[in-house]
Image: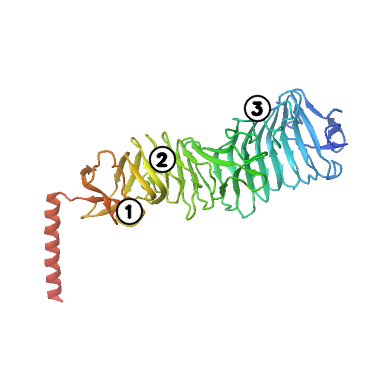
């Protein structure tokens, strides 16, 4: 970012764009009485800040000719705008790359609240990088890159709030990562959309990425998806790079196509040490989910929070929650499945597709009580292949023989393949001072059941207690 100009505080002024023709041929920026800056060639040029601290430039109606006119300015160099207000904007407007690679830094707020399209893009021969402090979008189309030949070189937004019936497009160059630190898809029920374009979409390997630190919103009709301007190949990647210690929750949809244009696959990648919750039940993306770092919690009551594709938990990633996922689930060495919401200690029932718990991976099970959801359970719809570690956290004192169905394998026919590391069929082990035994043929025949095994002395005490209780009851009934 370019530094703000220093100087004495002054009253904020709004400057208006007066385009005299369509395209880029001539424009001026004025306040109500004076032409303040601008030039005849329609270029923001040189290392400039337009206007000064606290000022806003406006693309308001009444200053830009007929509503059908397309207006644009070329960004030629590294330019800075403080605020951009499109209240009342009636014309499509474009900030356009020039013959040299340039940047546009809008350090304050962009307000986008009319149906006219606001575009930022490269031209066919050079690149434009855009950074924005806060973008408040509540109407129309807000687009970065507009076609296969006119993408955006890079995009960085600190805070993005999308509300209303709005679509935002991001089409970066191949392999580029566009960053939107905090995305809020808003509340309500409007059909707002964020579309991530796969670069050109002409090759299967083409990708476009939007990286997000926190993704939130309670609107279940919000949609984040992948698109292509040409043909349906390539992948749009939503990277959830959650900042450490942050927890954000998104209730909207994750889809292959947001509806306009040709669909390509959306892939979701979880990185960063923080937690992202996905609670929507209408996620139908097909590009798969990779959880490489931090925690992805799913809490959907129906459908599949992770779409239809495969789910891979790798490195130090954790998949948890109380929701449902249908894709084939592979957990690599170092990675963890932990039913229940939030951090360790919470219990819940997590439903997943076919499970491959590989050597060195972990299934973390909290035992907090004997009640239905008082202990963690994994429901698997599909095959179960085991080789990882079973990590038991015993958080209460069992008072007698107790069974915990920690993994419910669908049906009765498909036997579990393999065992947890160090837990052979029928074996017993001491965990937190308590002896447990395990079977992989429990429940209806193919479920994993962990049983508390009282020590012989405990049995005797327990047996004695029961005798005393029985004697006490006999005496009580004798007195009645
Ligand atoms: Ca748990
Ligand atoms: Ca079963």
**Quadrant of the rendered image containing residue 196:** top right
Which of the two marks, 3 or 1, is nearer to us in this view?
Answer: 1
Q: Which residue does the image show at 48% across and 52% down from the upper left?
A: 300
Image quadrant for the C terminus?
A: bottom left
Q: Which residue does the image show at 37% across and 44% down from the upper left?
A: 344
Mark 3 and ligand 1: say if the CB distance to the nearest ligand atom is below 8 Å.
Answer: no
Mark 2 and ligand 1: say if the CB distance to the nearest ligand atom is below 8 Å.
Answer: no
User: How many residues crowd mark 3 within 10 Å: few (<14), some (14–19), many (20+)?
Assistant: some
Instruction: For marks 3 and 2, give the CA distance.
Output: 41 Å
Q: Which residue is mark 2?
A: 330
Q: Which residue is mark 1?
A: 413
Q: For residue 246, say whether it is visible.
A: no
The earlier-in-sequence mark between 3 and 2 is: 3
> In the rendering, at what x and y percent does residue 131 appear?
66, 32
Q: Please give left or right for residue 38 compared with residue 359 in the image.
A: right
> Which one is nearer the viewer's eye here, 341 or 338?
338
Q: Please give left or right for residue 370 compared with residue 196 in the image.
A: left
């Amino acid at each position: 970012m370019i530094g703000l100009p220093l100087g004495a505080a002054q009253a904020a002024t709004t400057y208006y764009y007066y385009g005299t023709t369509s395209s880029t041929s001539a424009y001026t920026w004025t306040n109500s009485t004076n032409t303040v800056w601008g030039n005849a060639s329609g270029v923001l040029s040189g290392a400039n800040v337009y206007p000064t601290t606290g000022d806003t430039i406006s693309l308001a109606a009444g200053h830009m000719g007929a509503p059908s006119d397309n207006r644009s300015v070329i960004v030629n160099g590294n330019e800075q705008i403080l605020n951009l207000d499109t209240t009342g904007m009636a014309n499509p407007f474009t900030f356009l790359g020039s013959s040299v690679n340039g940047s546009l830094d809008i350090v304050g707020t962009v307000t986008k609240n009319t149906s006219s399209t606001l575009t930022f893009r490269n031209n066919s021969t050079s690149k434009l990088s855009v950074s924005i402090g806060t973008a408040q979008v509540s109407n129309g189309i807000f687009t970065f890159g507009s076609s296969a030949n006119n993408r955006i070189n890079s995009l960085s937004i600190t805070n993005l709030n999308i509300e209303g019936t709005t679509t935002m497009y991001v089409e970066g160059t191949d392999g580029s990562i566009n960053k939107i630190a905090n995305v809020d898809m808003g509340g309500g029920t409007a059909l707002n959309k964020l579309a991530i374009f796969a670069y050109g979409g002409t090759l299967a390997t083409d990708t476009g990425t939007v990286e997000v630190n926190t993704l939130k919103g309670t609107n279940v009709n919000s949609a984040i998806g992948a698109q292509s301007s040409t043909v349906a190949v390539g992948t749009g990647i939503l990277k959830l790079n959650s900042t450490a210690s942050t927890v954000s929750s998104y209730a909207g949809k994750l889809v292959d196509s947001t509806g306009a244009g040709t669909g390509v696959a959306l892939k979701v990648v979880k990185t960063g040490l923080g937690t992202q919750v996905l609670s929507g039940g209408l996620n139908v993306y097909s590009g798969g989910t990779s959880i490489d770092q931090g925690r992805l919690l799913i809490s959907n009551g129906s459908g599949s929070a992770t779409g239809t594709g495969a789910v891979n938990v790798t490195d130090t990633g954790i998949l948890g929650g109380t929701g449902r996922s249908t894709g084939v689930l592979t957990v690599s060495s170092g990675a963890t499945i932990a039913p229940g919401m939030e951090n360790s200690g919470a219990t819940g029932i997590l439903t997943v597709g076919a499970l491959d718990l590989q050597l060195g991976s972990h299934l973390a099970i909290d035992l907090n009580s004997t009640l239905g959801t008082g202990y963690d359970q994994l429901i698997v719809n599909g095959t179960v292949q085991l080789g990882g570690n079973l990590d038991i956290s015993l958080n209460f004192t069992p008072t007698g023989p107790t069974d915990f169905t920690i993994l419910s394998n669908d049906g009765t026919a498909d036997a579990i393949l393999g065992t947890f590391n160090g837990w052979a069929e029928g074996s017993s082990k001491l965990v937190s001072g308590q002896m447990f035994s395990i079977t992989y043929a429990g429940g209806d025949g193919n479920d994993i059941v962990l049983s508390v095994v009282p020590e012989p002395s405990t049995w005797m005490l327990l047996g004695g207690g029961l005798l005393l209780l029985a004697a006490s009851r006999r005496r009580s009934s004798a007195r009645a």
